[in-house]
């Protein structure tokens, strides 16, 4: 295929990955603060209510899911456009696993309620595992980036 350079696509991917990691960090922080509030521990210095914290956590979660799905689309389109097929590195599997973890985490978040105590612990466990997934996809992604740079 004779297609134009995909460097603009990789720039979008780089920004999306950076923003995904930032969203993950903010989600970790807001999740920790919600845990402290739920257990009646002080969060002095923060001038936000519980509902504002939950709203911020939800907005950041939706943002991260959107960014990860954007990264999946960019990866598929860019790799198919550049190589004509998928599966040129372990980055594909790392990406698929991260997407699955993010979607499972988002699903488990929708299930959190007083009647479903398993949902919160599943959500937290998936997010802890997601840390390793993000590290793996970042490391394998760096090797992929080297293939595309002129």
Image (cartoon, grey):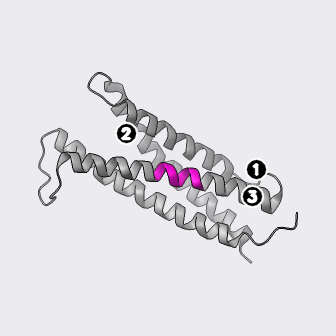
Q: Is residue 86 left or right of residue 102?
A: right
Look at the image and give the residue range highlighted in magenta: 64-70
Quarter holding the N terminus is bottom right
- Residue at the image position 77 percent from the left and 51 percent from the top: 86
Q: Residue under label 2, please give it.
A: 124
Q: CA distance from mark 2 to mark 3?
A: 32 Å
Element type at marker 3?
A: helix
Q: Position of residue 94 (x, y in %)?
A: 61, 49
Q: Residue under label 1, please give it.
A: 87
Q: Residue under label 3, please give it.
A: 79
**Mark 2 or mark 1, which is nearer the start of the sequence?**
1
Q: Is residue 142 left or right of residue 114?
A: right
Q: CA distance from mark 1 to mark 2?
A: 30 Å
Residue found farthest to the right? 1
| Quarter of image, res 37 | top left
Q: Eyeballing the image, is 148 above or below 91?
A: below
């Amino acid at each position: 295929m004779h297609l134009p350079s995909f460097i603009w696509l990789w720039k979008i991917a780089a920004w999306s990955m950076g923003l995904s990691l930032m969203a993950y960090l903010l989600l970790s922080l807001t999740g920790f603060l919600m845990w402290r509030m739920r257990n009646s521990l002080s969060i002095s210095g923060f001038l936000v209510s519980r509902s504002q914290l939950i709203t911020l956590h939800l907005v950041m979660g939706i943002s991260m899911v959107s960014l990860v799905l954007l990264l999946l689309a960019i990866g598929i389109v860019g790799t198919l456009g550049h190589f004509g097929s998928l599966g040129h590195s372990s980055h594909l599997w790392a990406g698929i696993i991260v997407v699955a973890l993010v979607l499972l985490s988002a699903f488990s978040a929708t299930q959190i309620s007083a009647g479903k105590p398993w949902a919160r612990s599943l959500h937290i466990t998936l997010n802890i595992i997601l840390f390793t997934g993000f590290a793996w996809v970042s490391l394998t992604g760096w090797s992929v980036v080297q293939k595309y740079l002129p």
